[in-house]
Image (tube, rainbow, N blue to C red):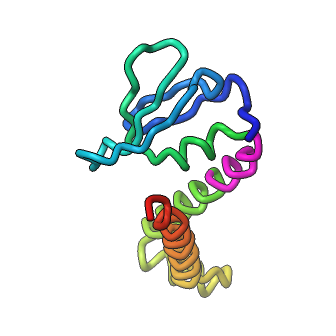
Amino acid sequence: MEIKPDRMVSLGYGKYWRSDAIVGLTPIEENRGPGRRTEVYTATVDEPIVASRSEQAILHDMAVASDERFRIQEAREILSDMLDALNDIPDVLSRVLSSEARFDVAGWRRRLHVFLKTDMAEAAADQSDLFD
């Protein structure tokens, strides 16, 4: 795996570290829970940093190949924001858009909701076998 230097990697809960300064990752097995998923060892801190993300997620963000992942994540966030905006459209305006501009607000809401729900389910399934 090739690590991209100077990339900031999220460790969760507002903690970020430079990708090229991370030297080791160990999954927390005892007392693991919310906010306690991985111990992150760095070149500059003697004690490990406790991360709320899995080691696989952190590794994925450190790799050069994850540039595409960042673009995909940004697209997901845009679609989620779009769904939020469509959900804020009042029913009266929705009917006007449908009749005057042939823009089906309810149809787009359903379509985006299904896509984002499916996308999140696939991401969860990808992590389900990490510790089997």
* Relative height, residue 90 to residue 56 (above, below): below
The secondary structure that most of the magenta stretch takes on is helix
* Relative height, residue 20 to residue 29 (above, below): above
Q: Can you give x and y, in whole percent of width and height, for residue 20 in the image?
A: 65, 24
122 falls in the magenta region? no
Assign the N terminus to one quadrant of the image. Answer: top right
Q: Nearer the viewer, residue 112 or 25?
A: 25
Q: Can you give x and y, in whole percent of width and height, for residue 97 in the image?
A: 59, 78
Q: Residue at x 27, y 49 (%)?
A: 33
Labels in figure, total? 0
Q: Which residues are magenta?
A: 64-73
Q: Residue at x 44, y 45 (%)?
A: 53
Q: Nearer the viewer, residue 49 or 24?
A: 24
Residue occupying the far left of the picture = 31
Q: Residue at x 37, y 37 (%)?
A: 13
Residue 64's quadrant in the figure? top right
Q: Can you give x and y, in whole percent of width and height, for residue 48 in the image?
A: 40, 25
Q: Can you give x and y, in whole percent of width and height, for residue 92 in the image?
A: 44, 79
